[in-house]
Amino acid sequence: MNTINSIDYPVYFTDTLNQLVNFVEKGNYSRFFILTDEHTEKHCLPLLQDKLVHLNHQYDIIEVNAGEESKTIDFCAGIWKMLIDFGADRHSLLINLGGGVIGDMGGFAASTFKRGIDFVQVPTTLLSQVDASVGGKTGIDFDNLKNIIGTFTSPKAVFIEHSFLHTLPIRQILSGYAEMLKHGLIADASYWNELKGKGDDLGLPEAKLIYQSVAIKNNVVVTDPLEKGYRKCLNFGHTIGHAIETYSLNNDEQYLTHGEAVVIGMVCEAWLSHQKAGLSKGELDEITAVLTNLYPKYPLEESCHAVLHDLMKTDKKNEAGKINCTLLSKIGECSIDHICTEEELCDSLNYYAR
Ligand code: NAD
Ligand code: ZN
């Protein structure tokens, strides 16, 4: 458990902060910048700064508000403006120190600033460590649509530091667990069984489980970096999950985390898998029991089905206006490109809500 080689960059798991300092030192960067949000500035930046004191380099900190509401073109423009004001040039480096919001938006800001400057990901949430940090997707939300503007741009490296997770609230840990469970469901039944075997005693996952999850995702993204086909398997739970996440962001005071929304999406899409892709009734029951036991029930009234369906129609995976889902043929094996009708999607929402 040391380093994973992703598309064209390394993902470090051990001695990561020293590795990061070495990386900056060797990179001959003119300047570097650390992008944080208010929580990672408080909890994670001091750990990094302890290491950076040994570097004879000037750097500046760019802080944005925490949360998905900040993943917008306005906040992104704020980052570009700070980079300009601080005198960033094409040989500058941006270090994204935070969860998926910082990683996605910082990656997007860097990939477009002066036609692209180098950036590295230092993910500080479980979700961003096991999922968002590998795969080269950057982006922002726009017009109430998630990740609708973005690029495929690789970071120069990813540094996964387990100790950052110690300050993460339990709800955020569970959000990351959702993606780990998804990785087991789509590609590795024994990994799913290992996670399932933990029962509802989910504390912070050990570093080995995080490594395994990154390895599963990485196998997928190196096979299909630009999501032409196989990479769509990572979208299991996300066609419905993204719609529910957006719906909750627009309608709820206590909105759902990405993982909580994806869990609902996975229950619905497991039901669709049983109807359309050969998932057995026994495995559907198992998936439903594990997921609904670990995560709180979210009220999904029939009155919101039309709104959710409209949101699903805007999903990036659709072609010719048809809603496309990734389903499971069995636990550990996925099946891509299933067109789902409005009626099937509504029935799957009713299955979750029953
Ligand atoms: P997030 O970045 O909003 O972080 C969640 C919360 O945890 C925030 O309040 C943050 O400030 C706080 N936080 C971060 N690190 C902390 C720490 N160590 N201690 C205490 N608090 C900490 O959200 P997230 O769940 O990490 O990421 C969700 C985003 O990731 C979504 O926008 C989603 O679209 C994106 N995503 C991207 C990809 C991809 O492939 N690019 C994949 C999955 C998800
Ligand atoms: Zn996800």
Image: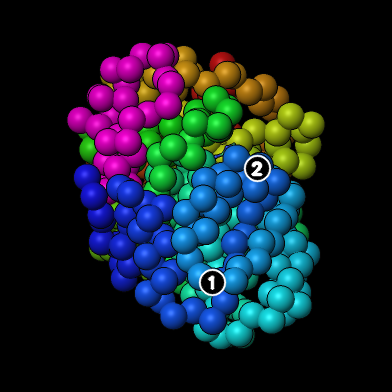
| Residue nearest the observer in this picture, 113 or 41 | 41
In the picture shown, does residue 55 fall above or below 293?
below
Taking depth in this image into account, of 242 and 68 the one nearest to the observer is 68
In the image, residue 288 sits, relative to residue 215, either above or below, namely above
Residue 167 picture location, percent across and down: 55, 32
Q: Is residue 282 magenta?
A: no
**270 sits left or right of 114 in the view:** left
Q: Is residue 196 magenta?
A: yes
Type of the residue with mark 2: Lys
Image location of residue 87, percent across then percent down: 69, 81
Location of mark 1 (residue):
57
Residue plotted at (69% across, 62% down): 62
State which quarter of the image contains the N terminus: top left
User: Which residue in the protein does label 2 denote?
Assistant: 42
Ligand 1 quadrant assignment: top right
For mark 1, give the secondary structure: loop
Where, by quadrant of the figure, is residue 154 drawn?
Answer: bottom left
Residue 63 is drawn in which quadrant? bottom right
Establish whether ligand 1 lies closer than 8 Å to the Cβ of label 1.
no
- Residue 313 makes an appearance in the image: no
